Image (tube, helix red, strand yellow):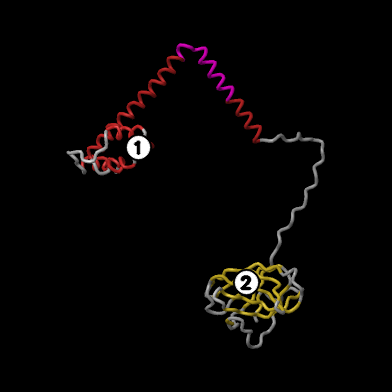
Amino acid sequence: MLDFARTYLSEAFPNPDRQGCPPDTALRSLAFNPTEGEPAVTEHLAACSPCFRRYGELLDEFKSQAAKENTFTWARISVWTKAHPILAGTAALCLLLIGIGVGFFLNGIRKPNTPPIDAHRKPNPTEPHNPTVAYSPFSLDLSALSPIRGSEPPTGTQRRVLVPNSRLNLTLTLPLASPEGRYDLKLAAEGQTFWSKAAQAHLHKGKTLLEVEADFTQIQTRNYSLEVRSSTGIRFIQLVSIQPVPPGTAEQKP
């Protein structure tokens, strides 16, 4: 692609009269000092084949000069090394010692000094690790609840569900056709919120499930209402009773 572009720009824009062409000094400045070149000259190269070809010649000249300078520099170093072998060896040894010293210095920074190990010292007893907090699975089937919009109170008669005041992996089965997405959960009584959390609902085997970790260990044992509100404002309210007893079954149905 680069070869094609170079060939295309060299031939596609003939300008035999050299109308609007910048002076050769501007092309040379762009080739030898690209950062100091004028933007207008660069734009002109894309629309003038003669100037583009001349720019290519200057680039080749610049590369040739740079190669000669590098060759000359290494040649001078080689000649100096052969003429002063003792100095060259001394310089190489100094560089080696400096590299070793820097290596030891960096190694000392990375590895802090550690106290010596006393083979006769009795090992300290192992400190106990905090045990992982366990959450018990607990399910609530809310599929029979009717949705409530806005601030309307729940209608109908509900059976209050017993919920243990412990750490629970709470799984809520929402009513049929409940959408997936974010839901806000709230445990409230007498207009006061005692626990709240947000969770994402997902479909599983045709059911909309909400899964959330709920720590009810600090919740006072009494009656509450568990409110589940969708992002669209639809609410489901289940009456619950937080009690210090384990659940009788793995799933509770209102």
Do callouts 2 and 1 mark residues in contact (Cβ within 8 Å)? Answer: no
Q: Please name the amino acid that badge 1 sits on.
A: Gly
The residue located at (79%, 35%) in the rendering is 119
| Residue occupied by mark 1 | 37
3D distance between C-alphas at marks 2 and 1: 69 Å
The residue located at (63%, 73%) in the rendering is 185
**Quadrant of residue 171 in the image?**
bottom right
Position of residue 22 measured from the top left corner of the image (x, y, whole percent) = 27, 37
Q: Is 84 included in the stretch rendered in magenta? A: yes
Q: Check disc 2: other Cα within 10 Å, few if <14, some if 14-19, many if 20+.
A: some
Q: Please name the amino acid that badge 2 sits on.
A: Thr
Q: Is 184 included in the stretch rendered in magenta? A: no
Is the magenta region chiefly helix, strand or loop? helix
Q: Which mark is residue 21?
A: none
**Quadrant of residue 75 in the image?**
top left
Q: Check disc 1: other Cα within 10 Å, few if <14, some if 14-19, many if 20+.
A: some
> Reading the chain from its start, which is encountered first: label 2 or label 1?
1
Please identify, in this view, whether the residue under mark 2 or under mark 1 is nearer the observer: 1
Position of residue 74 measured from the top left corner of the image (x, y, whole percent) = 41, 21
| Residue occupied by mark 2 | 171
Q: How many marks?
A: 2
**Quadrant of residue 55 in the image?**
top left
Position of residue 182 measured from the top left corner of the image (x, y, whole percent) = 56, 70
Q: Nearer the viewer, residue 152 or 140?
A: 152
Q: Nearer the viewer, residue 166 or 249?
A: 166
Q: Secondary structure at mark 2?
A: strand
Give the magenta part as a residue range: 81-98
Q: Quadrant of the N terminus?
A: top left
- Give the residue furthest to the bottom: 156
